[in-house]
């Protein structure tokens, strides 16, 4: 009997006439690609034919290589009901995991953080702050952690009152004058401590994390962000301000 693995669906898309390609995220196997054969066949019933995002499952699969065959899937607990901005945020996080996590590279701590984030997105008012901490932790897990408490090169401790330019692959470097891309030392320290409280800290942390992630993604932007922006443009009334979970 195939071994059962806890996991969440990150993405699925049609494959051939009646099948689907399904990417899942698990604590012990990391990101896994599955082919669900016949799951799109008319009249097909069963858990594997109606897999939902943000719902925990127990998956069983077989086969070797990068693409496995899905054998079974069963609900393994309560999922979360994300709507509106929270739904966009969840789709964004799923796409980040798809793009930044290598297949079959286990991240059990990141899996726990993902579960925590889903619960936060369902109930939290400040979605953007929840996303910043998850982005920070995700970068650390995949080997691109930010240096937030010391200057580049193992230098001096970050000073809250100083300005810094963050150099990719090096870290923060003190600058004499503020620039468009520089950020305050207290933003770096607040992000490290999980204590982003001011609008400036939240804005600068978002800019830092967005630039870092964009550098890792290359020239292929995240589809979830593009969809989010299009939907906002369609629904926003003139002069209306919206919360920004990005």
Image: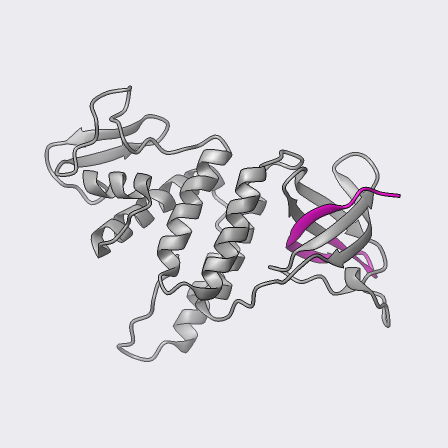
Q: Is residue 222 above or below residue 208?
A: below
| Along the line of sight, the residue nearer the viewer: 198 or 175 | 198
Q: How is the image coloured?
A: one colour
- Residue at 48% in and 53% down: 117
Q: Please, what is the dominant secondary structure of the magenta stretch?
A: strand
Q: Is residue 207 above or below residue 56?
A: above
> Looking at the image, which residue sits at the far bottom?
237
From this viewpoint, is residue 115 visible? yes
Task: State which quadrant residue 242 falls in.
Answer: bottom left
Q: Position of residue 40 (x, y in %)?
A: 81, 64
From the viewer's perspective, is 238 left or right of 130? Answer: left
Q: Position of residue 50 (x, y in %)?
A: 74, 65
Q: Quadrant of the N terminus?
A: top right
From the viewer's perspective, is 239 left or right of 160? Answer: right
Q: Position of residue 64 (x, y in %)?
A: 81, 35
- Residue at 86% in and 68% down: 44
Q: Quadrant of the C terminus?
A: bottom left
- Residue at 71% in and 61% down: 51
Q: Position of residue 124 (x, y in %)?
A: 41, 63
| Along the line of sight, the residue nearer the viewer: 10 or 237 | 10
> Looking at the image, which residue sits at the far front?
77
From this viewpoint, is residue 183 visible? no
Q: Is residue 3 magenta?
A: yes
Task: State which quadrant residue 174 falls in.
Answer: top left
From the viewer's perspective, is 121 left or right of 44? Answer: left
The region drawn magenta spans 1-21
């Amino acid at each position: 009997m195939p071994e059962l693995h806890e996991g969440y669906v990150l993405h699925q898309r049609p494959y051939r006439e009646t099948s689907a390609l399904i990417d899942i995220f698990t604590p012990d196997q990391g990101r896994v690609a599955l082919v669900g054969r016949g799951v799109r066949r008319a009249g097909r019933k069963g858990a594997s034919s109606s897999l939902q995002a943000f719902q925990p499952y127990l998956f069983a699969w077989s086969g070797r290589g990068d693409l496995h065959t899905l054998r079974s899937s069963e609900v393994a607990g309560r999922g979360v009901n994300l709507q509106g901005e929270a739904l966009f945020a969840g789709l964004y996080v799923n796409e980040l995991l798809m793009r930044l996590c290598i297949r079959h590279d286990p991240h059990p701590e990141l899996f726990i953080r993902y579960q925590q984030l889903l619960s936060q997105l369902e109930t939290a008012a400040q979605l953007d702050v929840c996303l910043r901490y998850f982005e920070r932790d995700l970068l650390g897990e995949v080997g691109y952690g930010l240096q937030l408490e010391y200057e580049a090169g193992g230098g001096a401790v970050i000073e809250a009152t100083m300005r810094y330019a963050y150099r990719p692959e090096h870290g923060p470097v003190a600058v004499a004058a503020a620039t468009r891309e520089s950020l305050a030392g207290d933003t770096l320290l607040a992000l490290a401590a999980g204590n982003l409280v001011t609008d400036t800290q939240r804005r600068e942390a978002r800019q830092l994390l967005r630039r870092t992630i964009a550098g890792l993604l290359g020239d292929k932007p995240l589809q979830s962000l593009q969809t989010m922006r299009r939907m906002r443009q369609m629904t926003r009334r003139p002069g209306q301000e919206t919360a920004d979970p990005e």
